[in-house]
Image: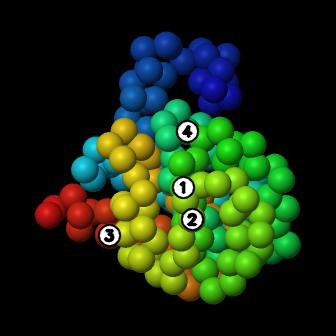
Amino acid sequence: MAATLSARLSGIRKDAIRRALATFKGVEHRLENLGYVDGVEYVNDSKATNVDSCWYALESMKKPTVLILGGKDKGNDYTQIEQLVRDKCTALVYMGLHNEKLHAFFDGMGKPVADALSMREALEKCRSFARPGDVVLLSPCCASFDLFKSYEDRGDQMKAIVKEWQQQ
């Protein structure tokens, strides 16, 4: 919206702005839509390495959501996303070596939960929880360095697996 307003104030015509917005692809690893598998939408938000970023991702979800979170915790306080998880998430998959804090905070919500030590394992567990019309969202709140080289590596692994499933 800020870019659109700035463009209008600069005298750029509405039709030119509309064309530019229609072709905008978005930012890789930030709410990146990967498409559908078996009627379930997959969204890569691997860049969400803090709770605030995950809050924005969850806030934007309009469908029942299976959330993948976890990794190297940076002293996170998950209170900020607690209500969004209660309202929007149908299941949680914790991906990381040390998920004790996630279990302590979220398990009492009564939602299905699972642990995973790889992206493939996380996505397979999400696939078992998700139903057609749902979304699987990777928005981990945490750094990637316990299982991955970087948040890009984490997101790229998700993209490769989803693409593989789409080709089956």
Upstream in the sequence, badge 2 or badge 4? 4
Q: Is residue 78 above or below residue 149?
A: above
Q: CA distance from mark 2 to mark 3?
A: 21 Å
Q: CA distance from mark 3 to mark 4?
A: 22 Å
Amino acid identity at mark 3: Ile
Looking at the image, which residue is at 82% across and 66% down? Answer: 76
Instruction: Please provide percent x and percent y for residue 7.
Output: 60, 23
The one of 91 and 26 positioned closer to us in this rendering: 91
Amino acid identity at mark 1: Ala
Q: Which residue is mark 3?
A: 161
**Callout 2 touching callout 3 (CB < 8 Å):** no
The one of 154 and 36 positioned closer to us in this rendering: 36
Instruction: Please provide percent x and percent y for residue 73.
Output: 75, 75
Q: Quadrant of the C terminus?
A: bottom left
Q: Which residue is mark 1?
A: 91
Give the label on residue 113, or none.
2
Looking at the image, which residue is at 43% across and 38% down? Answer: 24
Q: Which residue is mark 4?
A: 61
**Callout 1 touching callout 4 (CB < 8 Å):** no
The one of 50 and 77 positioned closer to us in this rendering: 77
Q: CA distance from mark 1 to mark 4?
A: 14 Å
Upstream in the sequence, badge 1 or badge 4? 4
Instruction: Judge from the rendering whether residue 34 lies leftward or rightward of residue 55; answer left or right.
Output: left
Q: CA distance from mark 1 to mark 3?
A: 20 Å
**Callout 2 touching callout 4 (CB < 8 Å):** no
